[in-house]
Amino acid sequence: MDLVIRNATIAGVARLKDIGIESGSIVKISDRIEPRGHEEINAEGNLVAPGFIDVHMHLDKALTLDRYDWATREIMATPRLTSVNESNKVKRTFTVEDVCERATRIAEMCIVNGTTTLRSHVDIDPVVGLIGMRGVLAAKEACKDWIDIQISPYAISGFDDAPEDAEKLLRQALDMGADLMGGVPEADKDGNSHVDRVFAIAKEYNFDIDFHTDQAQFETPFALPYIAEKTIVEGWQGRVMASHCFGLAHHKPEIRQKAVDLCREADVSICCTPFTTVNERVIEPVEAGVNVSYMSDNIRDTWQPYGNADMLQLALFVARLGRWRSNEDLDHLLEMGSTGAAKAIGIKGGHGLVVGNNADLVVFEAKSGHEAIITQAQKLWVVKRGRVVAQQGELLV
Ligand SMILES: [Zn+2]
């Protein structure tokens, strides 16, 4: 075997196990694997878990804090249009090489923190054109041996201003090597028509869809129910993600319950940044049976000055803000960021500690998922497609 991980704690399994890996896949899980592997890891009873999947990032804009002064920004929760305009100032400085270099740095931060796959949205608009797309595509290629990157181009400024030009540019991006496509209903006056347009294009390309949904924190746009209804009408169940969903927090319990029920029925996944209204956007939908994950979103740019590309840190934010305190809830939280996220974005090859699945794994310096979250455990080893690619915070490849 290429790699054997010995003495592994696996969530839900009573005894320590050895995990055998060959040709990038898990081929055996048993009490004792006799033949030595070409490479060996002794987990010493620590938790071996499926790698994290960060389902929502913005690699094109990340790490641009040095080009932006947050002190001059009006208030933290600015209207969306202000954020777009502020972002546009910085996007004018982008070059393909620059985007690629920053995106690669984020990918490195991800993998050493145990994230083995990420999804990045990419702005497609008249300001940046296809520069972001080219840069992120180059980073995807540069990092392909140690992390998978899904690319989701979207018309961040919508279609209202110049419908034909905006769609033409977006289609160019899709043709360049997108894995799916995104949308943002509130970018246009009629959010439903934006959703309709995105569905029409996505179906033509046979692409999954990821919507930036109801992003305003103090207003009440609510595209989520329409997205879920449209998903059912178009037969796109299991292929749509609703990101952010702040709108859920602005509505009465019975209205948001209806929206959440629609998401479950439409198999629409939700992903959220764990800072405000986590209870309405994460905990309630999870308890109602919706597939929910958490995500980095913007990292150190004009939208958000924070971010370490560390899903374990984000899990702790969800736990604290959502008041999830039991061992069972915390263990489930860890799974939401890995196997749950894998379901949300349609990982091929299977994700999770099951024979036949991809060997995308992380060994935590902890004996359980809840201990890993509570102690913010060191990621001792990270394995991507059966290869050890990071060890204790250092990239090995
Ligand atoms: Zn976003």
Image (spheres, rainbow, N blue to C red):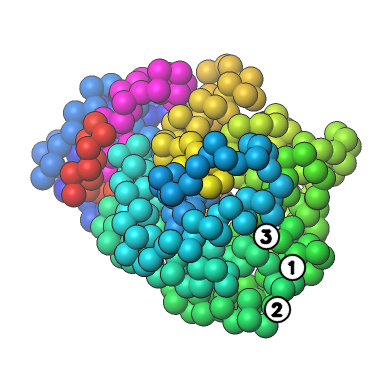
Q: Look at label 2 and name its amino acid.
A: Pro
In this view, 305 is above or below 6: below
- Amino acid at dot 3: Val
Q: Secondary structure at mark 2?
A: helix
Q: Residue at x 22, y 43 (%)?
A: 395
Residue 135 drawn above or below residue 53: below
Label 3 SS:
loop
Residue 92 x %, y %: 48, 63
Query: What residue is disc 3 on?
Result: 184
For residue 16, say whether it is visible: no
In the picture, measured across the screen, residue 50 lies left or right of residue 330, that is left
Report crowding for label 2: few under 14, some 14 to 19, many 20 or more residues within 10 A (C-alpha). Answer: few
Other residues around mark 3 within 10 Å, as few (<14) / some (14–19) / many (≥20): many
Circle nearer the N terminus (3, 2): 2
Q: Residue at image x 51%, y 30%? A: 315
Callout 3–callout 1 Cβ contact below 8 Å = yes
Please tell me whether residue 171 is drawn above or below residue 389 in the rendered image.
below
Amino acid residing under circle 1? His
Between 235 and 215, the residue placed more toward the observer is 215
Q: How many residues crowd around disc 1 within 10 Å: few (fewer than 14), some, or many (20 or more)?
A: many
Q: Where is residue 94 drawn, in percent x and y?
A: 42, 62
Report which residue position mark 2 lands on.
Answer: 163
Asked if the stretch drawn in magenta spans residue 362, the answer is: yes
